[in-house]
Amino acid sequence: MDNKVYTAKDYKSDQYVRWCPGCGDHAIVTTLQKAMAELGVPPHEIAVISGIGCSSRLPYYMNTYGFHTIHGRAAAIATGVKTANPALTVWQVSGDGDCLAIGGNHFIHILRRNVDVNILLLNNKIYGLTKGQYSPTSDRGAVTKSSPYGTVEDPFIPAELTFGARGHFFARAIDVDLEVSKECMIAAGRHKGASVVEILQNCVIFNDKIHSYVADREFRADRTIHLRQGEKMLFGKNMDKGLVLDGYKLKAVTVGENGVTIDDILTHDATTANDIMHQMLAMMDGHELPLAVGVIRNVEAPTYDQEVEAQVNAVRAKNPNKTLRDLLLEGDTWEVK
Amino acid sequence: MSEQTHVKDLENVVVRFSGDSGDGMQLAGNLFSNISAAIGDEISTFPDYPAEIRAPQGTLGGVSGFQVHIGKGVYTPGDKADVLVAMNPAALKTNVKYVKANGVILFDTDSFEKSDLEKAAFKTDDPFTELGITQQLVPVAITSMVKSSLADSGLDNKAILRCKNMFALGLICWLFDRPLEQAEHLLQNKFAKKPSVLEANIKVMTDGYHYGGNIHASVTTYHVETGDAQKGIYTDINGNRATALGLIAASEKSGRPLFLGSYPITPASDILHELAKRKDLGVKVVQAEDEIAGVCTAIGASFAGDLAATSTSGPGLALKSEAIGLAVMAELPLVIIDVQRGGPSTGLPTKSEQTDLLQALYGRNGESPAVVLAASTPSNCFDMAFQAAKIALEHMTPVILLTDAFIANGSSAWRIPDMNEYPDIKPNYVKPEMLAEGWKPYKRDPETHVRYWAIPGTEGFMHRLGGLEKDNVTSAISTDPTNHQRMTDLRQAKIDYIANCIPALEVKGNPDADLLVVGWGGTYGHLYSVVNELNHEGKKVALAHFNYINPLPANTAEVLKRYKKVVVCEQNNGQFATQLCGKIPGLVVSRFNRVQGQPFMESELKEHFIKLMEE
């Protein structure tokens, strides 16, 4: 890294952005460029890897090294990039279909291995590029082109899958909330290890307003909670509602009502190795309890790429100049004179 | 018993060790071939092991074999054995068909009890008559002699019985007049940390040797001619290890770190194992979650600047095909190793075939040309893996290297190369001054059509690659019809150009032959042996054997059209013959095809060639 101060423009390519007008992806790419400028990694030390889908076009719009690969495989390719050269900063951009259907296997394994890749999971609960089929995050009963009578299957909750795969970082944001989006991206960029940032993204053509229950400005303050490390879990227009633990469950209460004081409200700690509280927070959906946005889990753990590098270095240190010929001469040999 | 011991002079000899898969037959066979190689024999070995890891002891399904061919002019492990070692009735029953009619069968009498015969599904108590055995039988009470030999060793019964293979080895060394010193040296390396086991093994082996000397059996002993090998330091190497090491050599010669992304699959996993060990040489290995991730991690590593490879077998190649297409499109270097096995589907995982050729050539969507190479012997795997990596790096293309279960598991003696004998590998990197000249990602060398490689981390050369069709200069997404045609042509021209960088097709045998035998890949040893033999007998036969399949050597059409009769021999239903006839207008060939999961039988080839010449 150098001392140069970067601006969002340094990360913007000369390509014309081809997403539909009104698509949530426009805000996401702009926010990512701003987040990268704040993180300050030079553009040539960044690789942005994507799979297939609307969101996977994103690398073309970044003035970094980029690779728009094949459907579902971004996580595997990103694993190769980062393992080969841990000095690169690697971002992965995937949609819900790319990441959780065809790429589900690679998604759980990049998390299990804890490869230091920042994964942006753009969740619009629909297949956009193939024009409107249900995805693995579509709600049960979703009526789409491929489910005209409604789906009869449950969706994945990306956070739940992340924790199930032993993920160490999960954050969530809504596409229209640029500040929280940027905050999550920066935290993911700073986290060493696989980090998942789920961005609830609106597909204006095939699934418009799918997130409006929580995303609309009118309700957002009451139906979402912005979690901040070390701060009380407060939400609502007046920031007077909060979360408490009621037995084994979370409960929303109002400070000042029924004898509840600010001291009763839970304090957010994303860094506990135990993920039970993170799981409960991440599963809130905006109905009974507010949908959690911000960094929900952020735990340090050994990363795959560094461990591989360390193992190579440790073995190599025993004989740094060893060559293939040296190896062959160590084995069972005989000489013909 | 006669007091006379006959000595038979032979140019070469084939020994087959067989027993339960836990009997250590592979080790005994391996040691015997190494001992022979150390005194100057040419060697070729082949293990024949069951797909089951440990079938019930003494049953037909659990028999494991190891065939060793030693002497002069050794190109294959041999059709049939001169000597068979059978540790139990099941081994005898499954292996007797691999023994010459006038051969010798040495067996452990202690394991031919009634219950042993039942386990091997014999119907009578006379297995020899039941099998119609014509060979000379040498009964030896191996188990009881090993027990008495180690009675005072302090080892438990199980450990004692595990030394039976060394008794057999000692006896075979006596039979072929092979000194035990080299075996002792090899055992010392193997059991360095277990001195009591080492001592027991050496004692039993020595006892086996002396037993041979003492019985004065009327067994023919053999004097085998030793070969005249090139001077140098030798080791024995199997194809999978040679493949792995060839990639390491290419990494040393190119300066690009080696990366392997792979998923375990028979019979290719030993490449993964070998490279996983090679952290001492800086190799990084990802054991991926599936075949697709194996190739995709390699593509990622290639994008990041490594010499990247993935190893697999036929079913895995099928799974990787979409990703290989991505590497074609993105014009990234990538080595894909397919150790072919019997197919289709799961097929015959431990057996050998050449049935993936057309899959390698054409098994992708779109016009998706890639380089296809094939290795012909265990040690040739080293050279072809090196070549695969060289072509991939210098021409920015995926290269598929076909080996097969036969050469992957077979071993031959190999002179350890001086790496100065190998050429440098020079990828077509971007140069800093290109920025001022208006560098674009898909600008390419005007002669070779190779684009310039900008490795992430290089300042100023940020660019985007992808599976979508790109403009032939800027690499911006393009759906322009003429650009797509141009890119399709460029991708093909880039591969075609490689014909200028590979060796010409060589013809061995009689240049004025009446019959040209054509082969490719792992059948080389068999075809060469037979062509040699026929020429010795005064028949005019030649061999053209291919290591380079796409592109073909530039002189291919000229060579093949020179001969009146051409026969293409392959372990499939005619895939290479079809490819040749498609590429060379007017070429007429006959075909010799076997799909049995087994190497060619030399006797069968010979008979077929003679018939063709007489037609």
Image (cartoon, coloured by chain):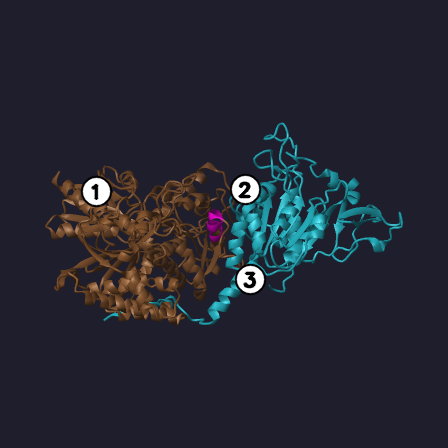
Tell me the quarter of the image containing the N terminus of chain B.
bottom left
Question: Which circle marks residue B567 in the picture?
Answer: 1
Q: Position of residue B34 (x, y in %)?
A: 28, 64
Question: On screen, A143 above or below B411?
Answer: above
Callout 2: helix, strand or loop? helix
Report the amino acid beneath label 2. Answer: Ile
2 and 1 marks on the same chain: no
Please state if A132 lies on the left or on the right of A296 as rendered. Answer: left
- Using the image as rendered, state which of residue B407 and residue B512 is in the foreground: B407
Quarter occupied by residue B584: top left
| Residue A291 part of the magenta-drawn span | no
The residue lying furthest to the top in this view is: A149
Reading the image, the residue beneath label 3 is A306
Task: State yes or no: discs 3 and 1 in contact (Cβ < 8 Å).
Answer: no
Callout 1: helix, strand or loop? strand
Magenta residues (range):
B290-298
Report the amino acid beneath label 1. Answer: Val
Q: Chain B, which colour?
A: brown
Question: Which circle marks residue A44 in the picture?
Answer: none
Report the amino acid beneath label 3. Answer: Gln
Tell me the quarter of the image containing the C terminus of chain B.
top left
Q: Position of residue B348 (x, y in %)?
A: 36, 44
Q: CA distance from mark 3 to mark 1?
A: 55 Å
- Chain in cyan (letter): A
Quarter occupied by residue B270: bottom left
Callout 3: helix, strand or loop? helix
